[in-house]
Image (cartoon, coloured by chain):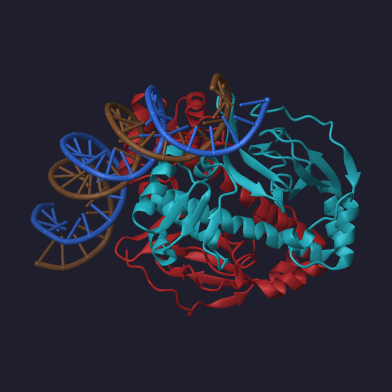
Chain colours: A cyan, B red, C brown, D blue
Amino acid sequence: MNVIAPATDDALRTRAAVRMPWPALLGPLSSDDAAALDALAVARHVPEGRMLFERGRPAHTIVALIDGQAACGWAQPPRGLSPERVLHGPAWLVLAAPLGDRQHACDALAQGPLQLADLPVEPLRALLMNRPVLAWRFIEALAREVGRQEARLHGLMHKDAGARLASWLVAQTDGRTQAVLRLAERKRDIASQLGMTPETLSRMMRSLSERGLIDVSGYTVRVLDPAALQGLAGG
Amino acid sequence: MNVIAPATDDALRTRAAVRMPWPALLGPLSSDDAAALDALAVARHVPEGRMLFERGRPAHTIVALIDGQAACGWAQPPRGLSPERVLHGPAWLVLAAPLGDRQHACDALAQGPLQLADLPVEPLRALLMNRPVLAWRFIEALAREVGRQEARLHGLMHKDAGARLASWLVAQTDGRTQAVLRLAERKRDIASQLGMTPETLSRMMRSLSERGLIDVSGYTVRVLDPAALQGLAGG
DNA sequence: CGCAACATTGAGGGCCCTCAAGAGGTGTGG
DNA sequence: CCACACCTCTTGAGGGCCCTCAATGTTGCG
């Protein structure tokens, strides 16, 4: 199914139908704070291929992606949406827009069936007024987001395609002892997030492969020389 | 003076020596909240050419740029620092790093004499625990930062040099009735922030000028056709 | 099997970077 | 006052990276 369905509002909403993974989103939380968020959150299911929101539309609710895969970017009618950011739950799908410009800055698409949790911003604000620890967790979450974006900005400004791919591979393997990745997205979406075309990504993969730094087989990438990758990444 | 001085700690520190422009940084504040921030802030003066911090170093304090011009980017020993971000006070010079990674992600340089205000993060945290409205202001400030970065990321990924310049010009004129800009930074620094070389910026300026969209005379740029610029910017 | 979507590979070209030279402006010292 | 150094910006020539377009191979599904 490659058809993109428009954003509609026929979703089944329930309160706390699923257990919310707040610690993964905000760090360690008191059970009190978690319960307060649970009370605020509205769970929502979205089928694959549905637009979640469009840029320019007002953003009233913070949205946590509980489970599933979603993409953010600019949709262009003929070609579809090329993702600038792909999210895998649990992660914040919409965090800053309702708090800052109160307007979505990009289009978002469900790349698979999604489980979401909406936090209306005004009630959340009221809640945070009484729960300073929770407010601090949101501050930290936003700060981490800024840090990630700074790194991406630097990469786009100063690194070539090969360095960006190497950097991405290093980041993907980071924290795992096993140096084998299974790509969770289409290669064209990975390319899009790295600011290059699928063709260029393919060529870069082959280049790294021919130099013996990685071994590519379909959607499985084995990292053979992490140090050399780190060097190419420019860090 | 084009020599870059290393970051040292010989600054003269005072408490609230200057009136702090908190509203410009955080939005409207109760006089109580402002006074609390004043009590926490340590004013600091830095001469031109001084490094403010270096990437990788621990970030313990949030830093407000009260007055002056500072640049953030990656310094490379032979060439100096090419700014990815140039700040004019009042603005947040360091906001996210101490709250997220607790580590500076870039180098920073005083491009003129600076007036800074340091907010140590631990005392600030303690303060925000008692001042939820203030905490909310920081949340909003961080969210706005995320929004700005998203726009820059999108520009670098999908716009060519001409569109990025047009977009920047539109953003600079935004909010002024007078369509005359005085460039506050060297053109090479503007180019650097836009992710292009000074040569390319010069050619793009000439191109826009020849097409009658702007009129350039040194550091003065008159915007003649804002609508066409907006069109080029891709919005 | 036939179709559709994706990935790969190749050819060609455009955007923009690099390198180099020249112009204009400013501060310093003779 | 002028020469000179030094900085920035500008302009031109050349080339490399990566995008675009097109064809082919691969995979999954009805």
Location of residue C8 in the rendering, given as x and y in whole percent from the top left corner: 41, 40
- Between D5 and A12, the residue placed more toward the observer is A12
Q: In the image, what residue occupies the spot 66% across and 34% down?
A: A55
Image side of residue A177 versus residue B72, left or right: right
Q: Nearer the viewer, residue B228 or A182?
A: A182
- Where is residue A223? Give x, y as percent: 46, 60
Task: Answer whether residue B39 is visible to the viewer in this image.
Answer: no
Please tell me in which quadrant of the rendered image residue A230 appears.
bottom left
Q: Position of residue A43 (x, y in %)?
A: 85, 46
Residue B224 vertical placement versus B114 (above, below): above
**Residue A12 or residue B172, whichever sits in front:** A12
The residue lying toward the viewer, choosing from A221 and B201, is A221
Name above or below for residue A212 compared with residue B4: above
- D1 relative to A235 in the view: left or right: left
The N terminus of chain B, quarter of image: bottom left
Residue, far bottom: B10
Q: Quadrant of residue B202?
A: top left
Q: Is residue A154 above or below residue A230?
A: above
Is B29 on the left-hand or right-hand side of A163?
A: right
- Going 58% across and 40% down the picture, which residue do you hit? A83
Which residue shows up at 75% across the image and 42% down it? A114
- The image quadrant where one finds the C terminus of chain B is top right
Q: Is residue B98 visible?
A: yes
Image-based side of B87 in relation to A73, left or right: left
**How many discs mark residues in the rendered view?**
0
On the image, the x and y values in percent for residue B229 come to 48, 28
